[in-house]
Structure formats: structure tokens, C-alpha cells
Amino acid sequence: MTPRERVRRTLEFEEVDRIPIENSFGGELERKYPSDVARPPFRYPAGKSWGVENRKGRRMDIWGCIWEAGEDGVCGEVKESPLRGDWSALRAFQPPWEVLAGADLSQVNAACAASDRFMIPMWGELIANPFERMQHLRGTEQLYVDLGSLEPELYRLRDMVHEYFLKQVGLWVKTDVDAIHLADDWGAQRSLLISPALWREFFKPLYRDYCELAHAHGKYVLMHSDGYILKLIPELIEVGVDAVNAQLFCMPIEQLAEAFAGKICFWGEIDRQYLLTAASPAEVRQGVRRVAAAFLRQKRTGIVGQCFEGKEHRPENIEAVYDEWSKV
């Protein structure tokens, strides 16, 4: 079974020879535990952006938002939002269309043909993240105020951002990649950030559009969303998300598995709030086994082994994640 076949079968809830993994750590760890997932080569122009992501200091992203990081290894926070305050700046504001116009995807198809791994463009400017982008453009606090009043300008902003991401998804679905990537963090530690009713009314149609466009071209959809998103998972299933990369350990894992195993694939992860940062490798292995026991009760499928790298994550704990998944 090739890596691509293994991931595709997992997304279709068919038995696999082993649990597929996404391992983007490189070096010796990836040599020991080869990833079933890869990212295609591409080039986006810089547009108006400047500075270096994940480095201490300030930078501007392609939308004109100014970020500031206090140390290396973190993305930092948006400190200057181009649409903060009243709505006067919205009238002349435009998404970074020049970035999509200059996107070079000419090597994508050849890379997909040359690899037997599951190919997906991930993270950075490649994702469709309308909620987070609207926060960056308005400022987080201001956007929550906006969502309380739902003024016409907010709908115009939403539709503008959505139009951009639809065009971006449209570029990628015409290539030979296997899937597209969406990412919006919708949960706090113990609840959603907004009410389910507001999410359904204002944001759900956006994700449905991305999924329908992807599926029309034979692509899968992976969505990342941090926090406690238990009440959103049925909605994600309904709009067509094939796999969700969620903070499983923020939620009752066994309840998640009971309700949703076989309906949506769970793409990782392992707790990065405690297990990866402060626990022993033995505790990490126990965490992996807990996830496996919950989701693999019926058959070996429907989950991808994965974890994230963070500044305080212990290398021995990350290795324990992949080593334990190799034994499941």
C-alpha cells in the first residue's frame, strides 16, 4: 500500500495496513518515521509583505496586517489592523489579488506525479481562514463587537475575504494535489468562541462553498480548528469536511469517537498543552494509545497520526508520538 493509498483509504474509512502519519519535522525523525503526507512546491509573490515570519520583530503580511513577535519561533500577534476602527477604510480596501495573479504552481503536478505520498498544500498563506483573516483585518476585539451588531459593512468584508479564498482554492483544485487545507480556530478551552447559531448563519456557508468546490474537482478537504469545537463537528461533517485536525485533548475523546468515528476522519493530534511539553514519553505513549483505543474500536482506519512542534515541546516526546503510532 503506497502512502497516498493509505491516506485516501483512511479518509474513506477503509481498512489500512497501518495508521498513516503526517510527519513534517524532517531530519532523523522523519527518516525513522517517514511521512505519508507531503507538500507540493510552489511560489507565491511577496506582494506588499515584508519581514520574516516566526522571527523576533515586526513584519507585514500580504493583506497589510502588521505582526509583532517577542521571540524567535512564534508567529506573534497582529498589532496593526488595516481596517480597525470605523469602516471608512473598507471602501478602498482590496485583498491581495496580485499574490494569486502571480502564484507559480507550475511544479505542482510534476511533484505529485513523482511522489507516492498524499499531497496537500498546508499552512501559511495557502490556507483559507476567513474568521482569522477577518480578525487580523479588524482586530479581534472589534470583530467580536461587529459580530454582535452584524452591520452591512461586516457582510461586505466577509464576502470580500471569502471571494479571495474561493479564488485561491480554485487555483489549487485545478492541480493534481489530493486535498486542500482550511484553518480557523473556533474553540476556547471549554467552549466555542461564538454561538453555534451565529456560526451557522454567518460562517457555515463559506466552508460549504470551499468543500463543494474541492469535491467537484475530486479533492479531499482537511480543516484545522483549535479549541473545544465539539458542537461544530456535526456542522463540519454536513458541509463536507473530510478530516479535522482538532485539539482532541480539549474535548472528551471517547465521546468524540462514539459520536463521529466513521463520519469524519480525525487528523491527529496529541495534547500540546501538557503531554508534549511537560509529560514523560511513557505518558505520551499512553495518550496515543488512548486515542487509538477510542477511534479504532471497529477497524483500523479513520485517523491520521500527527502532532505539532512548539518551542517548549520535548523532542523525546515528539518521537514517542510517532513511535507509538507505528506500533498501533
Image (spheres, helix red, strand yellow):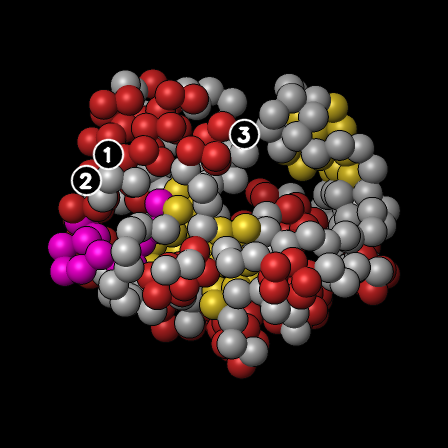
Q: Compared to 72, does 134 lie above or below?
A: below
Q: Residue at x 64, y 19 (%)?
A: 71
In the image, residue 322 lies in the stretch drawn in magenta: no
- Looking at the image, residue 286 sits to the left or right of residue 49; the answer is left
Judging by the rendered image, the residue that carries numbered circle 3 is: 27
Residues rendered magenta in the picture: 294-305
Mark 3 belongs to which amino acid?
Gly
Q: Residue at x 42, y 72 (%)?
A: 239
Bin the neighbour count of mark 3 within 10 Å (Cα to Cα): few under 14, some 14-19, many 20 and up.
Answer: few
Point out the residue furthest to the left here: 297
Judging by the rendered image, the residue that carries numbered circle 2 is: 290
Q: Nearer the viewer, residue 36 or 152?
A: 36
Judging by the rendered image, the residue that carries numbered circle 1 is: 287
Q: Compared to 21, does 159 lie above or below?
A: below
In the image, residue 300 lies in the stretch drawn in magenta: yes
Q: Secondary structure at mark 3?
A: helix
Q: CA distance from mark 1 to mark 2?
A: 5 Å
Bin the neighbour count of mark 2 within 10 Å (Cα to Cα): few under 14, some 14-19, many 20 and up.
Answer: few
Q: Residue at x 19, y 53 (%)?
A: 296
Q: CA distance from mark 2 to mark 3?
A: 28 Å
Mark 2 belongs to which amino acid?
Arg
Mark 1 belongs to which amino acid?
Gly
Q: Compared to 98, does 308 lie above or below?
A: above
Bin the neighbour count of mark 1 within 10 Å (Cα to Cα): few under 14, some 14-19, many 20 and up.
Answer: some
Residue 207 x, y percent position in the rendering: 51, 67
Q: Secondary structure at mark 1?
A: helix
| Quarter occupied by residue 272 | top left
